[in-house]
């Protein structure tokens, strides 16, 4: 998947879901927040069916992951 970001979705009353989403899937999830009901979310790992009224936050990791000790 090109343009994939690490995303954590927090829910009311349960553990958060940490996954990797394309920019398109993330935009679709954000757009669904005002609609209520269920949203079918395609992730890098598979798919998830989200009950939108229980979503209380979405965080994204915008930094690129680096391996090693350098600050390059």
Image (tube, grey):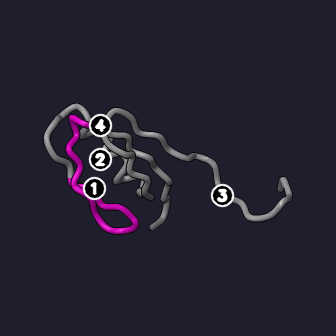
Which residue is disc 1 drawn over?
41
Which residue is disc 4 drawn over?
13
Residue sitting nearer the eye, 21 or 53: 53
Q: Which residues are magenta?
A: 40-54
Residue shown at the point (35%, 61%) measured from the top left:
43
Q: Secondary structure at mark 2?
A: helix
Q: Secondary structure at mark 4?
A: loop
Q: Circles 2 and 1: CB distance less than 8 Å?
A: yes
Q: Nearer the viewer, mark 2 or mark 1?
A: 1
Q: Circles 4 and 2: CB distance less than 8 Å?
A: no
Quick check: is 71 in the magenta stretch? no
- Give the percent coordinates (x, y) of residue 37: 13, 40
Between the C-alphas of marks 3 and 4, the distance is 30 Å
Quarter of the image for residue 31 reads top left
Say which quadrant the C terminus sits in: bottom right
Q: Residue furthest right?
A: 70
Q: Circles 1 and 4: CB distance less than 8 Å?
A: no
Q: Nearer the viewer, mark 3 or mark 2?
A: 3
Q: Which of the two labelled residues, at mark 2 and mark 1, occupies the earlier sequence position?
A: 2
Q: Secondary structure at mark 1?
A: strand
- Give the percent coordinates (x, y) of residue 50: 23, 49
Q: Which of the two labelled residues, at mark 3 and mark 2, occupies the earlier sequence position?
A: 2
Quick check: is 51 in the magenta stretch? yes
Which residue is disc 2 drawn over?
28
Residue shown at the point (74%, 64%) measured from the top left:
67
Q: Which of the two labelled residues, at mark 1 and mark 3, occupies the earlier sequence position?
A: 1
Which residue is disc 3 drawn over?
65
Between the C-alphas of marks 1 and 4, the distance is 20 Å
Q: Which of the two labelled residues, at mark 4 and mark 2, occupies the earlier sequence position?
A: 4
**Above or below: residue 36 compared with residue 49:** above
Question: How many C-alpha atoms fall within 10 Å of the one at disc 4: few (<14), some, or many (≥20)?
Answer: few
Say which quadrant the N terminus sits in: bottom left
């Amino acid at each position: 998947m090109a343009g994939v970001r690490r995303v954590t979705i927090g829910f009311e009353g349960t553990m958060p879901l940490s996954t990797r989403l394309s920019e398109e899937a993330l935009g679709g999830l954000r757009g669904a927040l005002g609609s209520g009901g269920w949203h079918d979310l395609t992730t890098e790992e598979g798919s998830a069916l989200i009950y939108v009224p229980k979503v209380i936050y979405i965080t994204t990791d915008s930094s690129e992951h680096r391996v090693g000790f350098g600050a390059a």
